[in-house]
Image (cartoon, rainbow, N blue to C red):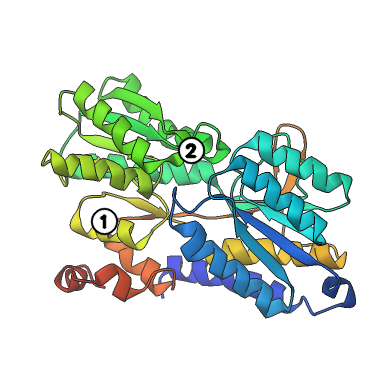
Amino acid sequence: MSKRRIAFTAVIAAVAIALTGCSKSDKAADGFVGVILPDAASSARWETADRGFLQAAFDAAGVKVDIQNANGDKAAFQTIADQMLSAGAKVLIMVNLDSDSAKAVQDKAAAQGVPTIDYDRLTLNGSASYYVSFDNEAVGRLQGEGIKACLDAAGKSTARIVYLNGAPTDNNATLFKAGYDSVLRPLIDSKAYTLVDDQAVPDWDNVQGGTIFEQMLSKAGGKLDAVVSANEGLGLAAVAVLKKNKLNGKVCVSGQDATADGLRAILTGDLSNTVYKAIKAEAEGAATLAIALLKGEKATTATGSVNNGSIDVPSVLLVPVGITKANVKDVITDGFQTREAVCMDMEDLCKANGI
């Protein structure tokens, strides 16, 4: 068993142990946990991974949960929260669309004595009781390191690159950029790499991302060596533009989330690298904390803390893993994606890469 696999298993096992210790109680039976997901468009993960893992974690503990999706609408986000609070939610888990709208929800919940958990995205200046996510600067560093490794493998000591950043309203996008820029900035400053363009994509909108990247490619005169894209939705939008220009596979493109489509693009060479985040462990970590809050028990799993601009929020921060062709199989072995989904119509390519 690889060290990486052991690490994945250890994280998930630790959280599972915590969950099994959460027996049913009368207090827990009196209320439920509300979960608000952000959208279904910026990344497939929210509906294909997080929803199912969260539901399973609460079901395993015998705790009622209501999981809803705001579908990218901040007004809907607040309406869902109001409805959950009116219906008797005792804890809210939320993935914010932006910090201001999420803070308003947290303030309202706090006024009603309902604790909140920031899930995946930190609400700046909010009042969350806990934060569960990954080390998001580390995610960005893995993206930057993957891009550099791809350029090195191509023998490119000089390169023309662009940054296709995530939503400016998402603190995670800020952290991702800080991470990859920390890897690539010394090469930019030394003039080895030229940063041709650097733009954020509003709302993580993949259609806008494709349009913005098309403009970047035009600005670069069709000559680019790498696209540092903040997630696979944006990376694959860039790949679609590169395909139209017969440049796919010739330009290094990063991603994040280890979706089935993203892993397939890694195997075909359209994406050079992505980042795998063990979302099952993230979901189970949030569920463990929510159940403790629901029962009025002290949580012991939040061993770190992150300052949100106003307070230090007790935090569970999981470790991301960089993915290239060499270790796509690890994501499948870990159970996050199925071999069938990744290898559909690509059997020979999968076998060639040890899958």
The label number, if any, that marks residue 203 in the structure image: 2
> Is residue 160 visible to us here?
no
Quarter occupied by residue 1:
bottom left
Q: In the visual, does 337 lie left or right of 125?
A: left
Q: Nearer the viewer, residue 321 or 215?
A: 215
Q: In the visual, does 316 lie left or right of 1?
A: right
> Is residue 335 visible to us here?
yes
Circle 2 Cα neighbour tier, 10 Å, few/some/many (<14 / 14–19 / ≥20): some
Q: Secondary structure at mark 1?
A: helix
In the rendered view, would you say 235 is above or below 189?
A: below
Residue 353: x percent and y percent? 21, 67
Residue 249: x percent and y percent? 16, 47
In the rendered view, would you say 91 is above or below 168?
A: below
- Name the amino acid, label 2: Asp
Label 2 – label 1 distance at C-alpha: 25 Å
Q: In the visual, does 220 lie left or right of 259?
A: left
Q: Nearer the viewer, residue 318 or 51?
A: 51
The label number, if any, that marks residue 266 in the structure image: 1
In the rendered view, would you say 313 is above or below 217?
A: below
Q: Nearer the viewer, residue 113 or 343?
A: 113
Q: Foreground mark, 2 or 1?
A: 2
Q: Secondary structure at mark 2?
A: helix
Rendered-image quadrant of the C terminus? bottom left
Reading the chain from its start, which is encountered first: label 2 or label 1? 2
Residue 236: x percent and y percent? 29, 47
Quarter occupied by residue 206:
top left
The label number, if any, that marks residue 152 in the structure image: none
Residue at 48% x, 33% y is: 178
Residue at 29% x, 39% y is: 148
Residue at 37% x, 48% y is: 233
